[in-house]
Amino acid sequence: MLKINLKKILINCTIVLVIFLVDRLSKIYILKIAELGNTVDIYVTQYLNFYLIWNKGIAFGLLSFNESLIYNVITFIIAVITILILIIIIKEESFKKYYLLLVFGGSLGNLFDRIYYAAVPDFIDVHINDHHWFIFNAADIFITIGVICLIFDEIFIDSKKI
């Protein structure tokens, strides 16, 4: 049986809200810059640029399609996965809950964009010389950190329990 602990619920909701707001505010800022200049191509350092693209696929632009039916199916699948992550978070008692909160908060940020804009604004361009990584956003960073932490937890911490 699940015990309701309001303090834990408040902490979890705060974590998700902060992640969502960091993601939203960064995207709003970049979109305002794009609105003023019709484009975003900002040199930050020799390894980092802000360059706005609209991603209709999943993480890092994978599975991008112009077909609206495929886009809607992918959005539906992402929404279902996000709900499943929430259910796992509710049931989870270990520290893994915090890694899942990172994934959940980032997923909510990108899901919001998929529904509101019909695409996700990606703008962080990491590169070395002419070798560019996929362009991503703050939500992708939180999702990636959460997934990496879950993998490390599974490999190095859970394996010790066996």
Image (spheres, rainbow, N blue to C red):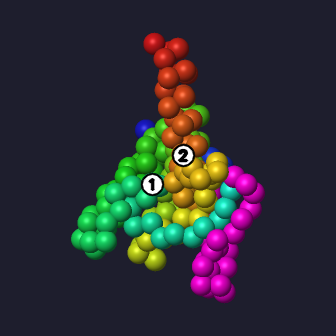
Q: Is residue 25 visible?
A: no
* Residues drawn in magenta: 18-47
At label 2, counting other C-alpha atoms closer than 10 Å, the crowd grade (few under 14, some 14-19, many 20 or more) is: some
Q: Position of residue 12 (x, y in %)?
A: 60, 51
Q: Position of residue 92 (x, y in %)?
A: 49, 38
Task: Report the front residue among 13 and 156.
Answer: 156
In whole angstroms, how far apart are the C-alphas of marks 2 and 1?
Answer: 9 Å
Residue at 66%, 86% in the rendered image: 36
Q: Which disc number belongs to residue 59?
A: 1
Q: Is residue 5 above or below residue 124?
A: above
Where residue 41 sits, quadrant-wise, is bottom right
Instruction: Identify the residue at image location x=74%, y=62%.
Output: 44
Q: Position of residue 5 (x, y in %)?
A: 59, 46
Q: In the depicted view, which residue is nearer to us: 145 or 61?
A: 61
Which quarter of the figure is the N terminus placed in?
A: top left
Q: Is residue 79 above or below residue 54?
A: above
**Secondary structure at numbered mark 2:** helix
At horizontal 35% and vertical 62% (from top left) the residue drawn is 64
| Outermost left residue | 69
> Do the numbered discs 2 and 1 sit on residues whose CB atoms are within 8 Å?
yes
- Neighbours of disc 1 within 10 Å: few (<14), some (14-19), many (20+): many
Q: Residue at x 54, y 28 (%)?
A: 153
Amino acid found under the numbered disc labelled 1: Ala
Q: Give the residue at mark 2.
A: 144
Res 35 visible: yes
